[in-house]
Amino acid sequence: MPNPVFLYQPYFFEIKPKSINDNHTTMKNVFIALAAAAMMVTACGDAKVKSKPVTAASEKVETVKENKSKRPDGVSEFYTFKMNDIDGNTIDFAEFKGQKVLLVNVASKCGYTPQYEGLQKLQEKYGDKVTILGFPANNFGGQEPGSNKDIKSFCTGNYGVTFQMFEKISVKGDDQHPLYQWLSMKDKNGWNDQEPNWNFNKYLVNENGELVKYFGSKVKPMSEELVAAIVE
C-alpha cells in the first residue's frame, strides 16, 4: 500500500512510517505550517486604532524614533506650533506642555458631525486630564464649506461646544497644514504615517508632546478605548 501523503500548500509533507520519531517530526512540521498560516490571516485585519508599539522588543526602536520628533534641545516639535483659533487669536502650543491633547479634524455637514456632542462631554468629564482641539477642514466631500464665523456659530449653537476650536485648515493633500504633516508623517512624529482619511479622525498626544495614538472616525469620543487612553 502506498505511503499516506498529507497535502498542505505550498509544500508536501510525506509520512514514512519508519519510526515514531519520524512521524512525530513530520506532524510537528505540519502544525508549524498551519500556525504560520493562521498568523498571516490575523495580520490582514483592519485596525481602527493605531498605537505606538510598547512591547519590550520594540521599546528601543521606538525610543530612537521618538527623538526624531524632538529638536536638538529635547523639546518636542509639537510645542513649536503657533496657530490661530477660530476667532483669529494666536495660540502657542507651548501652553499645552504637561497635558494630554486630543486633536480632531471636524466638519459641520458630515455623518460623524454628532460626535461634537461626544467631544463636548469628553471635555466636561475629563477636562482635567485632556485638552481637546478641533480643526475644521473641508478636505472630505466638501462637508465644511462655511467661514470660521459660520463654523463657530454652528458648533456652539447646536452642540454647546466650549473646547478650543481653530480656524479652518487643510489636513491632507498638497496644502496640508504643517501640524498635520507632523501628525501623519513618521519621520516627523516618530512612528505614525496615518493621515486623516475622513472627518473626525483623532490623534492623542501625551504630556511630553509625543504622538501616542491614532483613532479613526468610527471611534466615538466617549468610547471605552479612547477614554482608557486618556485616563491611563
Image (cartoon, helix red, strand yellow):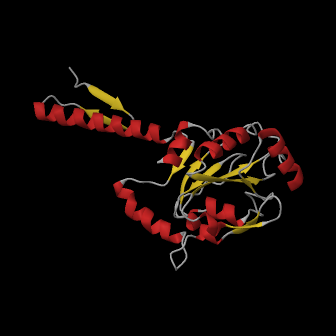
Instruction: Using the image, determine if residue 196 lies above or below residue 227.
Output: below
Q: Which residue is located at x 79 percent, y 52 percent?
A: 139
The extreme top residue here reads 1
Taking the image as shown, residue 175 lies to the left or right of residue 121, namely: right
State how many labels appear: 0
Q: Is residue 127 visible to us here?
A: yes
Q: Nearer the viewer, residue 16 or 61?
A: 61
Q: Nearer the viewer, residue 127 or 54?
A: 127
Looking at the figure, which quarter contains the N terminus?
top left
Q: Nearer the viewer, residue 16 or 89?
A: 89
Q: Which residue is located at x 61 percent, y 67 percent?
A: 78
Occupied quadrant, residue 12:
top left
Residue 106 horizontal/vertical position (percent): 75, 48
Taking the image as shown, residue 22 lies to the left or right of residue 190, namely: left
Q: Which residue is located at x 15 percent, y 28 percent?
A: 17
Instruction: Using the image, determine if residue 51 lies above or below residue 64.
Output: above
Residue 195 horizontal/vertical position (percent): 65, 54
Taking the image as shown, residue 158 lies to the left or right of residue 2, namely: right
The extreme left residue here reads 19
Occupied quadrant, residue 159:
top right
Residue 198 horizontal/vertical position (percent): 71, 46
Residue 190 horizontal/vertical position (percent): 52, 64
Taking the image as shown, residue 183 lies to the left or right of residue 115, namely: left
The extreme bottom residue here reads 72
Q: Is residue 19 visible to us here?
A: no
Occupied quadrant, residue 97:
bottom right
Q: Nearer the viewer, residue 3 or 67?
A: 67
